[in-house]
Image: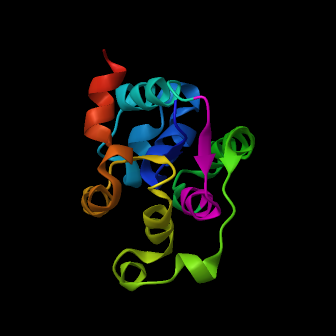
């Protein structure tokens, strides 16, 4: 199957959900829209891919968004460190990733995904970004709402 990039919020769900069977998902303000079932769904969906990729920007955002108490936070960071090692890293170029009007509108991380959407499937729950990615390469964009349906088939 094609190469997959998981966008920030869903990757954050994975690293927080991995601790104590998803017990802390609801403790994260960033993950209010998710639950343990969503965590399992994302894991099931990414298991359909042989290769899962990460950009340095997504890794940075995930680490900056971990908003849990110290003991749990430390466990999440320990897991994230090991989990990130299992993903294939995509080299970034800040000069290329900040080119164009889409950088102004979407920022660095999302603008890099805009550049990458022709070569990778992108799993995202960011509706605003998703709409723009679809305009570039519809076949490589996977809205989380669709992934939920695929993972349960």
Instruction: Specify the quadrant of the image occupied by residue 100.
Output: bottom left
Q: Is residue 73 above or below residue 144?
A: below
Q: Which residue is rendered at x = 54% and y = 75% of the image? A: 97
Q: Quadrant of residue 3?
A: top right
Along the horizontal axis of the image, is 30 left or right of 19? left
Location of residue 132 with respect to 147 vertically, above or below: below
Question: In the image, is residue 96 above or below residue 132?
Answer: below
Name the foreground residue: 63 vs 130. 130
- Residue 141 placement, left or right of 16: left
Report x, y in % for residue 95: 61, 83
Residue 11 in view of the camera: yes
- What is the x, y in percent for residue 112? 51, 67
- The reply to whether the magenta stretch includes residue 44 is no
Range covered by the magenta-colored residues: 50-63
Please say whether residue 141 is visible from this viewpoint.
no
Q: Residue furthest top?
A: 153
The foreground one among 150 and 85 is: 150
Q: Residue at x 26, y 61 (%)?
A: 135
Residue that appears at 66% across and 45% down: 71
Which quadrant would the C terminus be assigned to in this image?
top left
């Amino acid at each position: 199957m094609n190469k997959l990039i998981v966008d920030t919020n869903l990757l954050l769900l994975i690293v927080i959900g991995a601790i104590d069977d998803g017990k802390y998902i609801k403790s994260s303000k960033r993950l209010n829209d998710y639950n343990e079932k969503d965590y399992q769904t994302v894991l099931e969906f990414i298991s359909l891919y042989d290769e899962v990729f990460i950009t340095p920007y997504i890794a940075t955002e995930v680490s900056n968004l971990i908003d849990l108490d110290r003991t749990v936070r430390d466990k999440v960071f320990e897991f994230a460190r090991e989990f990130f090692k299992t993903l294939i890293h995509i080299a970034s170029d800040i000069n290329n990733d900040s080119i164009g009007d889409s950088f102004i509108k979407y920022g660095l991380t999302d603008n890099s995904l805009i550049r990458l959407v022709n070569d990778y499937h992108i799993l995202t729950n960011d509706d605003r970004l998703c709409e723009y990615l679809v305009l570039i390469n519809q076949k490589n964009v996977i809205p989380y709402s669709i992934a939920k349906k695929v993972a349960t088939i």
